[in-house]
Image (spheres, coloured by chain):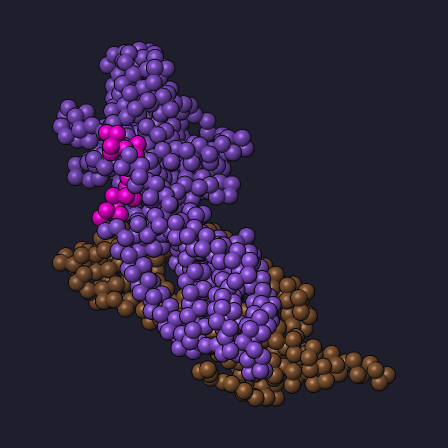
Amino acid sequence: MFQILHGVNVDWMRRRHLAFLFSGACVLISIISLIAHGGPRYGVDFTGGALVEILVTPPVHADAVRAAVDRAGYRGSEIQELSRPGQFLIRTEIKSGQNPAPAIVQEVAAEHPGSHVERLRYESVGPRVGGELRGAAIKAIFFALGFILIYVGIRYDWRYSLGAVAALFHDVFITVGALSLMNKEITLTVVAALLTIAGYSINDTIVVFDRIRERSRTLRREPPANVMNIAINETLSRTIITSFTVFLTVMALYTLGGEVIHDFAFAMLVGVVFGTYSSVYVASGLALEVQLWLERAGQGRGKK
Amino acid sequence: MTRSDQWKLYLTVVFVLASLWTLWPTFQFYSLPAKERQVVLQARPSQATTEAERLQLEKYAKLREKAIKLGLDLQGGMYLLLEVDTSKLGAAEAKNAVDQAMQIIRNRVDQFGVAEPSIQRQGDNRILIQLPGLLDQERAKALIGQTALLEFKLVKTEEESKALYDRIDGYFARKLRGGAPPDSAAPDSVQHPFTSKLLASSHAEAVVLNENIPIVDAMIGRLKADSTFSVDAQLAWDSHDTDVSGRTARGLYVVGKDALMKGSEVASAQMRLDLDATRPGAPGVSFNLTSRGGALFGDITGANVGRRLAIVLDGKIQSAPNIQEKIPRGQGSITGTFTEEEAQNLAIVLRSGALPAPVNVIEERTIGPSMGQDSIDKGIHAGAVGALLVVFFMVVYYRVSGVVAVVALILNILGLLACMAGFHATLTLPGIAGIVLTIGMAVDTNVLIFERIREELRNKRTVLAAIETGYARAYRTIIDAHVTTLLSSFALMWFGTGPIRGFAITLSIGLIINLITAVGISKMIFDAWSVRRKLSSISI
């Protein structure tokens, strides 16, 4: 048997306050970044606007593209050079219902008569549709969280369900914060990544909780913190192996998957790391806090 | 083997065979060379000329239908969300308008020649159009979005037109003066605010210089908005520019308010290059009317010999020929400064009819085919590397049991893809994300089981007992984890839009199959393996 992490005996719960501090700091950094950037940076999917992606062969300089875009009448557009030379992503607005792509392509081509300009991608979303897409995404996430809360509440205990949802929220929020720190956009694809993270996070948490529940039946006399430590230690090798395999897959997507999937993979990387950590600390730690608080409240009442 | 084990084995074999059978067309399709795949994509049996060709094309169409389709984000193409502007229609009309518009757009797209277009209704007044593959995006958009309301209207006589212009001038002059009396010494622009902006070649057909067009347009707009200004005529722009001593200008016509005949009477229309004798080779559209339209047209032309008849398309004058004599056969033509492509488009839209209301593009996504190909190549490459790493790790870490897990994982993906092919689902980028999560959950399921079995072995249980309790204990956790994830993905399916739903559907199918493969089938393999060999140790 080839094993890592056999027979670990770490007192996780003793250091939970340190973890709370760490989580709090991460959440705080996320909030600060979000405030500094004026909220999450939504892509055209959610704000409305247009996105033109072109490939110029032979490649030209970004300034030349900017000049051409200005001349096409779209001053103030954002121009981003992508990893492939000559590939540019232009974020712009839609003026009087006109598709900006042909004018931009034409101007870039006019600027460089020897170059071939290929239109790779064009997306335009009306402002109203953007708002609707945002509304639908938020509603979907809200209901997904609600269902999880209810199921975990029925299946386990509401103490657990609070911890599970807090961990879930923690992971997704910190990922959004990391996206904001890296100045990456929230697009529909990134929302899919956030959902995937939510899926992993809840899966991880359930596995730990399940073991805690099982152990609290067999180890009735142990204090809850010990039961949790035992459960976490027993599931630790599984937690790490699973996270590791997921990490491998996502790392492959991140490094090899190409630019369309890049932001998705980035969000997943952050989410997987925090998801693993949070199922140990945030979910169980909070569940323990709630339990201890209840016990104290119970003893207080008993004395009176 | 016990009886129930045998049954499980049979079911597994059926599952695998059925999956392979469902996926066979997909495999066939994607292993074709790119060029041939294009032929299959474009195959339309209705266009066959011979029986043999028809059979071949039908085979292609069937293959295309049964293969897993790639979403626009992966294969390139165009996604359009249209909103039908029903604000000017009554409630009953509005209800039909969207259905009509869909039918008409479908006809237009069919004639445009796109393989596998998808046209769906969304909500009350929206139409979602997806056109996969290579196409001329601007042309497709123009073709779909054009209202194509063809009307025949009489051009007003000189006297009628002059009377109208006098009234309009009077209307604006009064507004300019406020309450003051008319001043005959005032400049022309004050006495004749409207007509001073026109270069009148005649009253019925004036010309407006390019720089004045916005002002004139704004004035026309104000007249239309003022319900106290009632007229039985309409001012309509020419559809193309003219040249007035080197300056660009545009014609402005006074035409009747009501159409004498509409485009619904057009039976057929073709692009022609020989319609305008003065400009040979200039593209135009000739059309034939229905028999009812033909009779009506005969009456109209007969009653108005000597007058001009304007051919109005979407509110713009295409041409306004003189009626020389009664035209008894229902034939006519539209000329103007068309390019060949525009004329072709016009012929298509005239054949398929006018949209009952204007449509606006409110969301558009076009992915170039090279971009799509790039995404697929990289996605497959990355996915393969990721999967190989996982397989490698599992086999190294869990040995023979790892191989069992990998077999279960392969069966899971096989089943998932087969379901997608069976349901005619489309594989998109978020769908791939769903598959990634499925793989993760599938691996996790096996890790959970194996770790549990290892624990039981450490507690000095026998191999058989360890497998039994390991599965039984892990099973509960697995069910809980799957149910929670399934619940949230159901929420996403109900409330999410396009890409989010795609993600949720793939994930849900993957998870349900995972319960069969990672739990059922892997257990069966373990049972067969351990029972038959009466193992005293296990490679895990």
The x and y percentages for residue A108 are: 22, 57
Q: Which residues are magenta?
A: B35-54
Residue A7 against residue B526 in the figure, above or below:
below
The x and y percentages for residue B401 are: 45, 72
Colour of chain A in the image = brown
Q: Residue at x 44, y 68 (%)?
A: B404
Q: Quadrant of residue B378?
A: bottom left
Magenta stretch secondary structure, dominant: helix
Pick the residue in front: A184 or B72. Answer: B72
Q: Quadrant of residue A37?
A: bottom left
Q: Quadrant of residue A178?
A: bottom left
Identify the residue at the far right of this view. Answer: A304
Q: Residue at x 58, y 71 (%)?
A: B468
Q: Residue at x 28, y 37 (%)?
A: B57
Residue B79 against residue B177 in the figure, above or below:
below
Residue B37 against residue A193 in the figure, above or below:
above
Count every numbered label the image shows and give the total: 0
Residue B310 visible somewhere in the drawing? no
Q: Residue at x 30, y 52 (%)?
A: B30
Colour of chain B in the image = purple
Pick the residue in front: B161 or A142. Answer: A142
The magenta stretch spans residue B470: no
The magenta stretch spans residue B45: yes
The x and y percentages for residue B273 are: 17, 28
**Is residue B173 toward the left or the right of residue A155 in the image?**
left
The x and y percentages for residue A285 are: 61, 80
Residue B245 visible somewhere in the drawing? yes
Pick the residue in front: B100 or B276. Answer: B100
Pick the residue in front: B488 or B386. Answer: B386
Residue A83 against residue A289 in the figure, above or below:
above
**Is residue A304 toward the left or the right of residue B256 in the image?**
right
Q: Quadrant of the C terminus of chain A?
A: bottom right
